[in-house]
Image (tube, coloured by chain):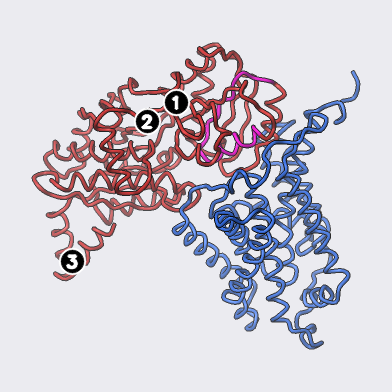
Amino acid sequence: MNRRHFAAALAGLFGAATLPALAQAQTVPVGAIEILTGPAAAYGIAIKSGLELALAEINQKGVLGGRKIALTVEDSAGDKNQAINAARTLIGRDHVVSIIGPTLSTEMFAVGPVTNGRKIPTIGTSTTADGITAIGPYIFRTSLPESDVVPVTFKKAQARGVKTIALMYANDDAFSKSGYEVMKKSAEKLGLKIVATESFGTKDTDFSAQLTKIKALKPDAVGISALVEPVSGVLLQARQLGFDSHTLFIGGNGSNSPKLGQIAGKAADGLLVGSPWFIAKPDAANQAFVAAFKAKYDKDPDQFAAQAYDTMHILAAAIDRAGAADPAKITAALAKTSYTGVMGPFTFTPGRDPASTAGVVVLEMKDGAFHIAN
Amino acid sequence: MPPVLFWNNPMLAQQLVNGLLLGATYALFALGFTLMFGVLRVINLVYGFYFSAGAFLALGLTHLGFGIWSALPVAAIGAGALAIVLDWLLLARLRRRQAPELASLMVTLGGVLALYAGATAILSPDIRRLPAELIASSAYVVGGVRITASQILILLATGVLVTALVGLMRATRLGLAIRAMAEKPDAAGLMGIDTARLAALVSFLSGALAGAGGVLIGLNFNAIQPYMGEEMMLRGFVVIIVGGLGNIEGAPVAGLLLGFIEVLTAGYVSSGLKDAVGFAILVLVLWTRPQGLFGRATAERA
């Protein structure tokens, strides 16, 4: 944002009329809509960090023969209407050629129809709900949908002897609800018996009633589909209520954050979660990314930052291959993406979803940190 | 089949304890809120921020080596002091000019949004928790019912604070002055009560109650983040409205009621209906008793 403001101020010196021409000649405008304020801001800030780290690398060379990408990140505050306004602002004011985001699937279901209608290629980096790319031909995503990740985790649980499972999910969030549907389908497909289904609100802090009910049913496992904050709350309260290590907790994609260990500590021990990315993946590209991220932000990257980092590179490469800062050409180029980044080899399916699930690893929480589960 | 009662049904017993604890949490949060409204006649939306501030002050103090028994009162006093300052900055001027209540409400709305956003920018939105070793985390088990030390602390603190506040209001000259000011601020002023000083004192008391609530609730739920007060506000509204706006005895009763209703709905009907039932009761109470369950029927001020 600072860069754009600086460019605008500079352009202002030459008079307002020259501003659009000057800005377009020098930079390729790209927008992002992320949650930067409010209770879920941690996700948007991680994504913004990943995008900006990649952007700095990209702009050393530039795209389309030396033009820099100018990234404008708008805050959605997790609000659908604010996200739609942000999309309209980015398209109308900044003339962006592509939009990255928004952060939540709920927001994408609101923003996608708008950007798709304006034929602006839109790439979700963290939207894992079912049906995202079905919004239209300009909607892409680089995040593996839960329906690809969860079955891998559940198979691991079954191999450890799990036969009955209770499911819990946040019922006020599209991501969590769709994750629950996926868990339900995966459990049915594997022949696991679902003994209870309980819901809660994303901002709830008390889960005692639901957990007391589940505890009385003695399931082998509890699957939780929600963002990391409520998952941490559920685990902490489960230990207070006397759930022990005989019950295997299984998280959806929301649990896949180092914050789980920071908030829940020992209470999260034993939790299984499938992940499209893992900080300790040993390949050189990933280790270089982790080192650069730590150097710039003084903290570990999470999956959301990694996905955003790859997506910025994927988009820059597509702009380059498109040969022009033109949304239609960029859309066509995106579809032909073949890129190897920190998530592993990446291509899109004809439905604009990620094609490969080979990179999925099942992780287990131990002493506040994730390790590859055996 | 014998009747299923709580002494031979550990699950129901646990659910009743869960309801009691959740209700105590709501009561603890609402106590200062209803005091502030009852005396100062303003729905002060900044209240939730004092709750967050108390929790963060305690977090900072424990990092400096304070234990829970010293961090709790210091954080409460800090939140109270903050409440005096913010009340003076945001509302004292409007009170002097006898501005309409809507103006005061909007000032506190703008103020609290700025405070939350500012706090998030400085402190980051990450969830933190008080050090786990601050209080024993293992649960006591009595007849199949589990309860932790932090939960017992919430129950005790709620009981003590409610009793102390009711005692202060009913049995002291200061309480008499506060009640006089709540009833008729102008007349109270004419009778020689320093209403500006009293307003500051009430701000301090409610801020301190909010701060203490923030510490204890943050300790129990392990979820301290800048917006934590904002998320309690909706429940806080239900509790003070059902309890009768400004009614200090009504708020704890309404808090317990809401806690039991939410837990029993989630435990025995459907967890998806928990909020629907809680808020439907708010509507129902206001339909039948617009002044709240324990409020007085007549308008207290023309």
Task: Specify the subunit that label 1 lies on.
Answer: A
Report, in whole angstroms, how far the alpha carbon at label 1 lies from the one at label 2. 8 Å
Q: Quadrant of residue A316?
A: top left
Q: Mark 1 and mark 2 in contact? Answer it, CB < 8 Å.
A: yes
Number of labels in the image equals 3
Query: For the residues tagged 3 and 1, is the chain the same?
Result: yes
Tag of residue A278:
2
Task: Specify the subunit that label 2 lies on.
Answer: A
Query: Going by the picture, which residue comes out furthest to the left?
Result: A65
Task: Specify the subunit that label 3 lies on.
Answer: A
Front-most of A47 and B217? Answer: B217
Q: Quadrant of residue A143?
A: top left
Q: Residues within 10 Å of mark 2 (few under 14, many from 20)?
A: many
Report, in whole angstroms, how far the alpha carbon at label 3 lies from the one at label 1. 49 Å
Q: Which residue is mark 3?
A: A10
Query: For the residues tagged 3 and 2, is the chain the same?
Result: yes
The residue range painted magenta reads A218-239
Front-most of A75 and B144? Answer: B144
Residue B87 lies, with reference to residue A88, above or below; the image says: below
**Is A339 on the left-hand or right-hand side of B143?**
left
Going from N to C along the chain, the mark reached first, 3 or 1, is: 3
Tag of residue A208:
none
Front-most of B45 and A121? Answer: B45
Asked which secondary structure carries label 1, the reply is: strand
Q: Which shade is chain A?
A: red
Residue displayed at 67% across by 58% down: B72
Residue displayed at 70% across by 21% down: A217
Q: Mark 3 and mark 2 in contact? Answer it, CB < 8 Å.
A: no
Going from N to C along the chain, the mark reached first, 3 or 2, is: 3
Circle 3 or circle 1, nearest the eye: 1
